[in-house]
Image: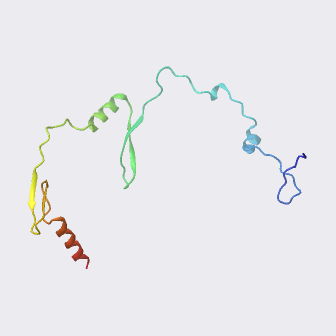
Amino acid sequence: MTEQTKQNLDGKTPVKPTPFDAHEQATRGEHLPTQADQAEPHAGEGKQYPKAVDHVQGSEPGQLEPVIVKSAEEEKAYLASKAPAAKTEAKPAVVETKIYSDGSSATGPAPLPELSPGQQDAQQAASRM
């Protein structure tokens, strides 16, 4: 087997292998990790505040802006204000039964529509013509 050399499009000039970060190597030299590059060890918890706990509608439509808290107390207060209110006794839904002029009937939570589904369809079809 003979070793082929890669050539440029002209077929004559050999292609020199160039590292991806050749510019960086030429400008800064070879990078060697140092102690400063290492992550700082932390005891227990890292820095937590300030942090974003929620996003709310911004000044422009469709834009959300973060809600930033600066301490655990602020976070608890914000989350408590966003918590749903204590559940109150739910009122039973009023169930209504209605007989329409076309002879159909419906039963469901009040208020039921004035027209039956068939009458609604007929009204929509008539309005399209």
Q: Quadrant of the N terminus?
A: top right
Q: Quadrant of the C terminus?
A: bottom left
Which residue is located at x 9 percent, y 56 percent? 97
Residue found at the very far front of the displayed protein: 103
- Left or right: 52, with 128 as reference point: right
* Place of residue 91 in the rendered image (x, y in percent of width and height, measured from the top left): 12, 43
* Place of residue 96 in the rendered image (x, y in percent of width and height, measured from the top left): 9, 54
Residue found at the very far right of the displayed protein: 2
Which residue is located at x 11 percent, y 51 percent? 95
Which residue is located at x 68 percent, y 29 percent? 33
Of residues 100 and 40, the one nearer the viewer is 100
Give the quadrant of residue 67: top left
Give the quadrant of residue 39: top right
- Left or right: 103, with 84 as reference point: left
Residue found at the very far top of the displayed protein: 43
- Colouring mode (rainbow / by chain / secondary structure / one colour): rainbow
Check the image and report above or below for 94 versus 100.
above
* Place of residue 120 in the rendered image (x, y in percent of width and height, measured from the top left): 19, 68
Of residues 22 and 10, the one nearer the viewer is 10
Which residue is located at x 65 percent, y 25 percent? 35
Please give the count of numbered marks on the rendered protein.
Answer: 0
* Place of residue 72 in the rendered image (x, y in percent of width and height, measured from the top left): 36, 28
Check the image and report above or below for 40 versus 90.
above
